[in-house]
Amino acid sequence: MEDDGDIERLLAATVPRQPAADLRATILAAIAAELDSRHRPAKWQSWLGHAVAASLLFSVATFFVVDWSEGRRMARWDARTVVRSDVAAVTDAVASVSDEDTARGVEQYLLSQLQDGARPETADLREEIEAIQRWAEAEPFANRSQGDEKTQDHI
Amino acid sequence: MQELAARLAGGETAAFAELYDACANQLHHYLVVRLRSRDAADDVLQETFLRLARLRHAFKSVENPVAYAFTVARNEANRRQQRAGREGFSLTMEDLFQVAGQDDREQRENTEAVTKALRNLTEEQREVIELKFYGGLTLREIGEVTGVPQGTVATRYRAAIGLLRNSLAKEWS
C-alpha cells in the first residue's frame, strides 16, 4: 500500500451483498399501505367510537325507560286515595249497619272536614253511628230508607 | 433536496419511491456491513422506510433527507443489535461482500484482506468507514448521522485509514 488513496480505492472496490430482488417492491408497497392508512382511523379508535355510541344509546334508552316507569308509579300514587285509619274505621262501621253508598257519603264528609282543617270528633260520631246501628236493628227492613234519611241528617 | 423533503412531509408515495432510489442501495450496503447479515439488512431497511413514512411530518425540518434516512437506519440497527444482544465481532467475507462467482483471484484476496483489516478497528472507527465507503456519505453527513462534530469524524477516519493501511501491509508482506 503506497498511500491512503490506495486504501480508499481498495475499500471502494469491495461491494457488499445486494438486497433481495423483490425488496424494493415490498418496501414501496408497505409504504403505500402506511400512507393510505393515514385517513383511516386506527382499530382502537373505531372500537372506542363504537363503545361511545353504544353507551350513548344505552343511556338514552335507560332514561326513557326510567322516565316512563316513574311516570306510571307517580300516576298510581296520584290516583290512590289516602284515608286516615280513624276515618276508615268509621266508614267501615257505617257500612256494616247501612250500605256502601251511605258509608262512602260519611267518608266524603269526614275527608272534606279534614281538608278544611276542622277535625271531626270521631268519638261523637261513633256514638251517633251506634245509635244509627241500634235503630237499624230495631226498625223493620221496609223502613230502612227512612233510616238512610236519618243517617244523612246526622251527616 | 428541500423540494423532496417537502413532498415527503406531504406523504407523497412517489417521493418515497424517489428517496428509496436515491439511497436504498447505499443504506443496504451500510446495513449489511453493520449487521453482518443480508437478511437482517433487508429487515432493517424495510423498518427504516416504514418508520420514515410514519414520521413523515419530521421531513418538514429536514435539510438532507438522505442523511436523515441514514440516521433512522442507524437507530433501527442499534435497536436490533440491542434486542439480539451484542455478539462478538466475527466478520466473515461471505457475510459481508459479494464473493460468490468472483473469478478475479486478486479481487477475492483483496476482499479477504479488507475483511480481516476491518476487524482491527474500534467500533467508532469502523462506523465511519461503513458510512463513508458503503453508505457513500461525506464526512459532514457522517457527523450529522452520528451526532458528533465533523472534526471528530475526520480524526476517526484518518485513524481508521492508518490502521487499515498497517493491517493490509502486514497481510501482504
Image (cartoon, coloured by chain):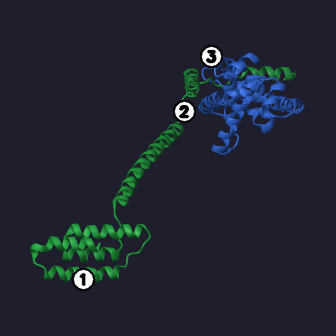
Chain colours: A green, B blue
- Distance from label 3 to label 1 (Cα)? 108 Å
Look at discs 3 and 1 and give the one toward the viewer. Answer: 1
Q: Which mark is residue B14?
A: 3
Q: Estimate how packed mark 2 is, as few (under 14), some (14 to 19) or many (20 or more) residues with alpha carbons within 10 Å.
A: few
The part of the image, by quadrant, that contains residue B120 is top right
- Residue A4 coordinates in the image, percent (x, y): 86, 23
Badge 1 element: helix
User: Which numbered disc flags the more N-terminal residue, 1 or 2?
Assistant: 2
Badge 2 element: loop
- Residue B146 coordinates in the image, percent (x, y): 79, 33
The residue positioned 61% from the left and 33% from the top of the image is B40
Q: Nearer the viewer, residue B66 or B85?
A: B66
Q: Is residue B1 visible?
A: no
Q: Check disc 2 and report the residue beneath it.
A: A41
Q: Are marks 3 and 2 in contact (CB under 8 Å)?
A: no
Instruction: Give the tally of numbered discs.
Output: 3
Q: Chain of mark 2?
A: A
The reply, left or right, for residue B70 in relation to residue A132 is right
In the depicted structure, whether residue A139 falls above or below residue A74: below
- The amino acid pointed to by label 3 is Ala
Q: Check disc 1 and report the residue beneath it.
A: A130
- The amino acid pointed to by label 1 is Glu
- Residue B97 coordinates in the image, percent (x, y): 66, 26
Q: Estimate how packed mark 3 is, as few (under 14), some (14 to 19) or many (20 or more) residues with alpha carbons within 10 Å.
A: some
